[in-house]
Image: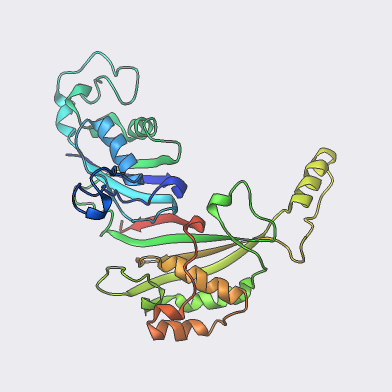
Amino acid sequence: MPRYKLTIAYDGSDFHGWQMQHPPEPGSDPALGDARPRVALRTVQEEVQRAVREIVREPVIVQGASRTDAGVHARGQVAAFTCSGDELHNAPSASGDGGSDGGGGGSDGGPRSAGGWPVARGVDRLVRALNGRLPDDVLIVSAEPVPSGFDPTGGATSKCYTYTIHSSRERPLFDRKYVMRAWEPLDVAAMNDAAGRFVGEHDFASFAALGHGRLTTVRTVHSCRVQAQSLMTPESLHAGLLASATTRAVTPIPVCGFEPQRVVIEVTGSGFLWNMVRIIAGTLVEVGRGRRCASDIDTILASRDRTKAGVTLPPTGLCLEWIRYAP
């Protein structure tokens, strides 16, 4: 019974998070009424699991490592599933692989109609087959065989999230679904000073959404840093396009009183509470705006009071970058 680890990227804009959500059963909520349809919310897990089941032709369960919220993106989500397949290698071979990665039979892995995905069939073919059945906003980055006991959730040793802020009076356009807009300049040095105070083992009750459902709010943050890069403004971008034709160098031109920036908050840790990174980011933005100072972080942590921390920033700027496991 081979088990496969998948690394998955997705645009979370049109998803209600990673975890599959079933519609309410008829009669479970009288307020819904018998005539109202039960709508199944679109989730990444559902899309990936559907694609896997179509390929392996078995009712497998795809288990994810991190339950990202609605609107949150990922470059390195991890999931795993187990299917039959190894025993098919010695089965009588078919005449061909059917001309596609997901159908027909194959001499390298037995008759395709038997179901499963033998390791001998290859993980590259598995990735291609899955991506051929996934929507445009989900992509399998890689796949690899793992031991039968591999647990994508409990086996994770560290995770990394980033939160990206567009600091400008001009609103973003092409990547507006992946950033949060700040209207004013941010003091990145002050934010970085404050970010360092999150590092270590702390009780993050002040930085968790109510109803997080965890037995403990103690977590370990391995690193927390803030970086910024200058943005080309619309005016300087236009000038740059003109200059590219004449090989002249162009310097970005600040507009609206300050130079636009992309500010990226990166947080790595052993695990995170519900909305923890978005609340950390919201608090750091308040530091960047001058409404708090770096030393306030220590007081907020000690208070264990959610009302003392900053706002929960919207999900658009949040991205799960990677998840790591023990060798």
In front of the other: 116 or 217: 217
- Residue found at the very far top of the displayed protein: 95
In front of the other: 18 or 103: 18
Residue 21: x and y in percent read 29, 49
Q: Is residue 59 above or below residue 220?
A: above
Q: Residue at x 26, y 42 (%)?
A: 35
315 sits to left or right of 189: left
Q: In the rendered view of the protein, which quadrant contains the C terminus?
A: bottom left
Counting the numbered discs, the total is 0
Residue 77: x and y in percent read 38, 51
Q: Is residue 51 above or below residue 174?
A: above
Residue 242: x and y in percent read 82, 42
Residue 315: x and y in percent read 47, 58
Q: Residue at x 43, y 56 (%)?
A: 320
211 sits to left or right of 247: left
Q: Residue at x 27, y 69 (%)?
A: 214
Residue 138: which quarter of the image?
top left
Q: How is the image coloured?
A: rainbow
Q: Residue at x 57, y 76 (%)?
A: 287
